Image (cartoon, helix red, strand yellow):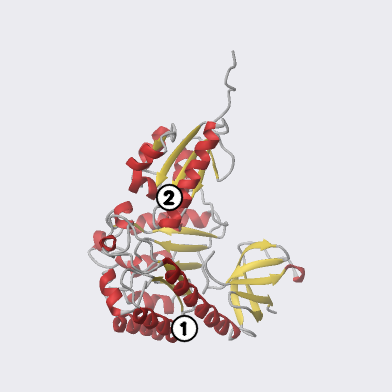
Amino acid sequence: MRTKTLKKNKINVVTLGCSKNVYDSEVLMGQLRASNKEVVHEEEGNIVVINTCGFIANAKEESVNTILEYVQKKEDGLVDKVFVTGCLSERYKPDLQKEIPNVDQYFGTTELPGLLKALGADYRHELIGERITTTPKNYAYLKIAEGCDRPCSFCAIPIMRGKHRSTPIEDLVTEAEKLAATGVKELILIAQDLTYYGLDLYKKRNLAELLQNLVKVKGIEWIRLHYAFPTGFPMDVLEIMRNEPKICSYIDIPLQHIADPILKSMRRGTTKAKTTKLLEEFRAAVPGMAIRTTLIVGYPGETEEDYQTLKQWVKDMRFERLGCFTYSHEENTHAYNLEDNVPEDVKMDRANEIMEIQSQISWELNQEKIGKTFRVVIDRKEGGYFVGRTEFDSPDVDNEVLINAEDGYLRTGEFFNVKITAAEDFDLYAEIAN
């Protein structure tokens, strides 16, 4: 009779989707380690936890394919158990249980204690800020709130993440201090909506006060803002950004569209005129700040005129950073009641054209940097280059600064002054400044 080999369980956490999922996986891994579980991130393990994304069609497809991949490994005897958590599981649990029954258990976004119990671990409330970070050692995400109260017609996040819930300032400071103690120097503040921070706890938009507390954390040198909503943006944040060196002159503010008929249908609560005025105020308050935005093309009812309005606006605004995506028709959203009437090939053509325009803008803006000196942080060594970023660039999505490794050794996580010697549309080349 064949007996099963006795072996210690190793839990492999696989993360899909956005930075919020990265953060959630890190918290899960920290809780597992506190229960003396052996845990790894996207390496070999006999127990697998897949943290899924359920935001748009491509992300859902990737999540389903990953689940199927590990279920097959389970059937082949390569892994013992497969658990699924995250947004896809929150949104489609009954369907997933029916279609992929060989998963051991499905958990939603708010069921961390149950997932830990299934993994033989205890959920410990006292572990504020205890995480196993999976990003390079010099930066980490700091999730300041969960959920979203916005009524955007195209977005399923409130379905998957629930209502907005801010994390108290003192807890975030504690978490930042623990990250700094491990060598983290850059905090990237994330939430579904930074703009709303504090309304539930402090009865006011309190992002500015949070920043004033975080800049006091020793060891933290850069604090970066991601995912701010344009309506009701707390303008006192700009004063802190201008006056406090630790706050990067950078903001990620997804605007989605600019044609008034589309903004109204999207339920964005703003207009072209208001949005343009807001961006002008940003640039006046913080000269030289980098503004990153994301846009959606092919939304139901988007006419050629609407698209041309958006295209011209992109040319006029000259965003430092921009991403463009095609509309995804999502069940249980308000826009799902509308006819998805823009053909897929038209959506793709519009997205590609916007990105071509942005590529040219980025090239032109980068040419202006040649000969100038910037402070950069080194993220990694890749091939013959050390790869860094300026305060105007976020990891994975923005420009990178490449410094020839033959010119000298640059330690990962350290800051250096460099002089830009050449520039492409999304890459800058530099040498160490004397």
Q: What's the residue type where badge 2 is placed? A: Asp
Question: Is residue 214 rendered to the left or right of residue 234?
Answer: right
Quarter in which the N terminus is drawn: top right
Q: Amino acid at mark 1?
A: Arg
Between marks 1 and 2, how big is the CA–CA gap? 34 Å
Q: Which residue is mark 1?
A: 318
Write down the residue under mark 2: 24
Classify mark 2: residues with Cα within 10 Å, few (<14), some (14-19) or many (20+).
some
When asked about the image quadrant of residue 20, the answer is bottom left
Which residue is nearer to you in this view: 59 or 123? 59
- Residue 304: % across, % down: 37, 79
Badge 2 marks a residue whose secondary structure is helix
- Residue drawn at 43 percent across, 79 percent down: 242
Q: Which x, y percent locates residue 147?
A: 32, 56
- Percent position (x, y) of residue 83? 44, 38
Location of residue 266 with respect to 21 vertically, above or below:
below
